[in-house]
Amino acid sequence: MADLKDFAEQLVNLTVKEVNELATILKDEYGIEPAAAAVAVAAGGGAGGGEAAEEQTEFDVILKAAGGSKLAVVKLVKELTGLGLKEAKGLVDEAPSAIKEGVSKDEAEGLKNSLEEAGAEVELK
């Protein structure tokens, strides 16, 4: 069981670049589409959310609205999440929606700042 907790900790602490590399490996070597991988990682991060909520060491980045420059926000969401253009547009269109879940405070703040610079309205939970 400890190995699974270590593995979960490693997943939660991945950088955006590492998540993109993981999505590529899952797609190329195992035939798992990146969108499905993102859902699996998001679901896994949500499972440990009870403990994290007490300490507030993990944050969810929620896109509340795309703002005036929707195209720039869609492109940024695509880049930050590693999703395809269609999936990123879907996330932006369905706002409010979670862009990233279970990330560190520093990463969450960075994502929030990037999205706000692109014109989006963002909330951290």
Image (cartoon, rainbow, N blue to C red):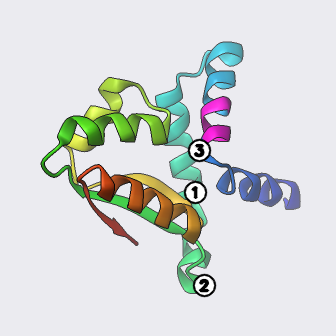
Q: Earlier in the sequence, mark 1 or mark 2?
A: 1
> In the rendered image, which residue does mark 2 sit on?
55
Q: Are marks 2 and 3 in contact (CB under 8 Å)?
A: no
Amino acid type indicated by mark 1: Gly
Give the residue type that dot 2 points to: Glu
Residue 90 in sight here:
no
Above or below, 44 against 29 in this view is below
Q: The magenta stretch spans which residues? A: 17-21
The quadrant in which the C terminus is found is: bottom left
Q: CA distance from mark 2 to mark 3?
A: 23 Å
Image position of 125 (left or right of 48): left
**In the figure, is residue 104 to the left or right of 71?**
right
Residues at marks 1 and 3, CA–CA distance in whole angstroms:
15 Å
**Considering depth in this image, is 122 or 24 the residue closer to the camera?**
122
Q: Where is the N terminus found, in terms of image quarters?
A: bottom right
Answer left or right for 10 relative to 34: right
Other residues around mark 3 within 10 Å, as few (<14) / some (14–19) / many (≥20): some
How far from the left and from the top, in percent, is residue 52? 59, 75
Q: Which mark is residue 45?
A: 1
Where residue 56 appears, as percent x and y from the top left, is 55, 80
Q: Which residue is mark 3?
A: 16
Residue most toward the front? 117
Q: Which residue is at 63% across, 23% downward?
A: 24
Vertical order, 125 against 62 (above or below): below
Q: Nearer the viewer, residue 67 or 6?
A: 67
Residue found at the far left of this picture? 68
